[in-house]
Structures are given as C-alpha cells and as structure tokens.
Image: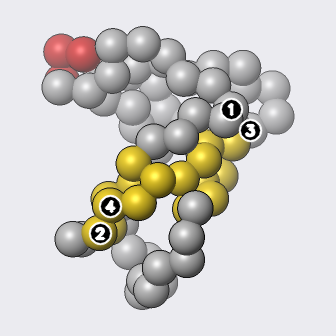
Amino acid sequence: IYVLSKEEGGRHSPFFTGYRPQFYFRTTDITGTVELPAGTDMVKPGDNTKIIGELIHPIAMDEGLKL
C-alpha cells in the first residue's frame, strides 16, 4: 500500500503492527487490524509497504476488490 502523507490529505504520524484502521470497500467501512512484514517496525506517511489486514467481521467481496 501507499500511505498518503499529511500534504496529500493522509496521515500525520507513523503506524505500527496492531494499528486498527477503518478499511473502505465500495460502500462498506469496517475496522481491521494491520500486521507489518517482518523487519518493518513502523510505516511513515509517504511510505510504500505490504501489509496483512484482518477484518473484525467477515464481509462479502469479489476477488481483486480494491480498498
């Protein structure tokens, strides 16, 4: 993912494993938990990274759906 910077209308501060953002899928918004890759301590605004996101409830979605 690309984390928008403050100037781009995004985050003002870094986040870490365990961060619980809102994920938006079309018209659904749902809380999830973020796990960062091994060796990545934090992600700062403006960074690109891979994440594992786990939603707090299952939702229906199509393969390839963007968030």
Asked if marks 2 and 4 touch (Cβ < 8 Å), the reply is yes
Q: Distance between the residues labelled 1 and 4?
A: 20 Å
Disc 2 residue crowd, few under 14, some 14–19, many 20+, Cα 10 Å: few
Is there any visible trace of residue 18 in the rendered image? yes
Q: Which of marks 4 and 3 is in front?
A: 4
The one of 43 and 17 positioned closer to us in this rendering: 17
Q: Which mark is residue 29?
A: 4
Who is closer to the viewer here, 35 or 18?
A: 18
Q: Distance between the residues labelled 2 and 4?
A: 4 Å
Residue at 39% across, 54% down: 23
Q: Which residue is disc 2 drawn over? A: 28
Density class for disc 3 (Cα within 10 Å; few <14, some 14-19, many ≥20) is: few
Which numbered dot is residue 37? 3
Tell me the distance, in whole angstroms, between the alpha carbons under discs 3 and 1.
9 Å
Q: What element carries label 4?
A: strand
Residue 34, position as x, y percentages in the image: 61, 43
Question: Mark 4 belongs to which amino acid?
Answer: Asp
Which tag, 3 or 1, sits closer to the chain's start?
1
Left or right of residue 55: residue 18:
right
Taking depth in this image into account, of 60 and 2 the one nearest to the observer is 60
- Residue highlighted by disc 1: 17
